[in-house]
Amino acid sequence: MSTPSVAVIDYGMGNLHSVASALAKVGGDVEARVTNERSQIISADRVIFPGVGAIRDCMGEIRRLKLDDVVNHCIDAGKPVLAVCVGMQALMTRSEENGGVDCFDTIAGQVRYFGKNHVDADGNKLKVPHMGWNNVFQKKAHPLWQGIADGSRFYFVHSYFVQVEDESLVAGVSEYGRQFHSVLARDNVFAAQFHPEKSGEAGLQLLKNFLAWDGKP
């Protein structure tokens, strides 16, 4: 029996080897491939689509390497896909960042800016980017939530947040001056704004769940 494999898509944005290290920690006998090779990604059992940085740069590299086609091919094939941070945002229709950037439009939704004068409910100024630990409140049951308590804290670094049109896709929400969609789930896609590999035990449990997930909601 072959060793299960996970492709961590590499388009030059972020420390992907920390993701691979976290997978090795929880996965035991799993092969983590950090790659931008179409054949390696398509042949993998599961796919992680990560990303950090400005969306224009990310989308530029994704399209140059034709990885948008590869990601959508994997989604259409029913392969379990975990999209993280900018990877999640890239699945949306459009982002406000960099004056407006068209994204995959795989999931109908927008990526919005928290704002320069972002404040909490009491009018206290909040720093943007939103950086650090925050609670994620689960909105629907999902295999990737197994063993993770509702309201668990995960690690975020972002100035932009996702708003989807179909509320039934929202699997988790967080609060930072306003409520935002921090986790989405549709069929074989699970997308998180936070970084699981930086999120301690809860993040490692989510990655462990991902490695066991068959892609069914």
Image (spheres, rainbow, N blue to C red):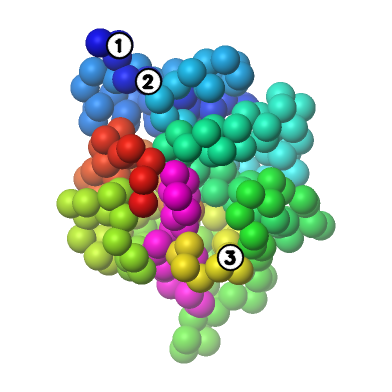
Callout 2: few (<14), some (14-19), or many (20+) C-alpha neighbours within 10 Å? some
Residue found at x 29% / y 61%? 141
The mark that comes first in sequence, 3 or 1, is: 1
Highlighted magenta segment, given as a residue range? 171-192
Residue occupying the far right of the picture: 99
In the image, what residue occupies the spot 68% across and 32% down? 69
Viewport quadrant of the N terminus? top left
Question: Is residue 84 toward the left or the right of residue 56 in the image?
Answer: left
Residue 108 position, x and y percent, is 64, 60
The disc at residue 208 is none
Residue contact at pointers 1 and 2, CB within 8 angstroms? yes
Q: Mark 3 points at which residue?
A: 164
State the image quarter where residue 66 is shown: top right
Q: Nearer the viewer, residue 147 or 46?
A: 46
Q: Mainly helix, strand or loop, the magenta region? A: strand
Relative to 64, say whether 116 is above or below. below
Q: Is residue 53 above or below residue 97?
A: above
The residue shown at (48%, 18%) is 43
**Along the horizontal axis of the image, is 24 left or right of 53?**
left
Mark 2 or mark 3, which is nearer the start of the sequence?
2
SS for dot 2: strand
**Which amino acid, mark 3?**
Val
Q: Is residue 6 left or right of residue 152?
A: right
Residue to which mark 1 is pinned: 2
Which of label 1 and label 2 is nearer to you?
A: 1
Q: What residue type is labelled 1?
A: Ser
Instruction: Work out how far the residue at label 3 is from the one at label 2, CA to CA, in angstroms.
Output: 30 Å
Q: Which of 12 and 45 lies nearest the eye of the viewer?
A: 45
- Residue designated by label 2: 5
